[in-house]
Image: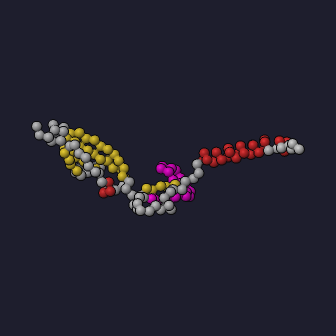
Amino acid sequence: MEENRTVKLFLDDDPQPFAEFASPVKFVFDTTKIPDGKHRLKIVAKSTDNIEGVRSIPFEVRNGPAIAVVGLKDNEIVNDHIPITVNAYGSERNDIFVVTGSETPKAIPAWVWALLIAFGGFAIFYLIMYLSPDLYKSFV
């Protein structure tokens, strides 16, 4: 019996496969040739009885620099003037590490402020309750 198992790989809605292999297949998918964004890998496999099976796998390519935005969220309703910080950093250079621009500045979380206020309140309470002159009597 003749082995006729084939696997065709399609990218997005392209009618022509970018690769065709005999099954089983193991390959390296080079995403550097694909533009950044959402894509879909469609795999069409044909068995020895010429029965086709199809599987579609959505994925996202991000070969460019990572972009972080502080001050504007997805689908946020805004008005007036809003300050926005945009930071883009990638891993093109492996020989040095640049500290400036490597981290995106973010505001201090609200729970940290609440913790500091609670600690300060307890400190003031302690000072009022336990630091009175009556507690420090001399033995002499």
Q: Main secondary structure of the magenta part?
A: loop
Coordinates of residue 42 in the picture (x, y in percent): 27, 45
In which quadrant of the rendered view does residue 22 lie?
top left
What residue occupies the far front of the structure in this picture? 140
User: Does 85 appear above or below 117?
Assistant: below
User: Does 129 appear above or below 37?
Assistant: above
Image position of 69 (left or right of 14):
right
In which quadrant of the rendered view does residue 136 lie?
top right
Query: Which residue is at a point 39% across and 58% down the rendered structure image?
Result: 64
Colour pattern: secondary structure
Coordinates of residue 115 in the picture (x, y in percent): 64, 45
Query: Which is more toward the observer, 99 or 83?
Result: 99
Query: Which residue is at a point 42% across and 58% down the rendered structure image?
Result: 90
Quadrant of the snapshot with the N terminus: top left
Query: Which residue is at a point 38% across and 54% down the rendered structure image?
Result: 62
What residue occupies the far left of the structure in this picture? 1
Query: Which is more toward the observer, 135 or 125?
Result: 135
Residue 103 falls inside the magenta stretch: no
Q: Which residue range is magenta in the image?
A: 71-89
Coordinates of residue 32 in the picture (x, y in percent): 32, 56
Residue 84 falls inside the magenta stretch: yes
Image position of 88 (left or right of 83):
left
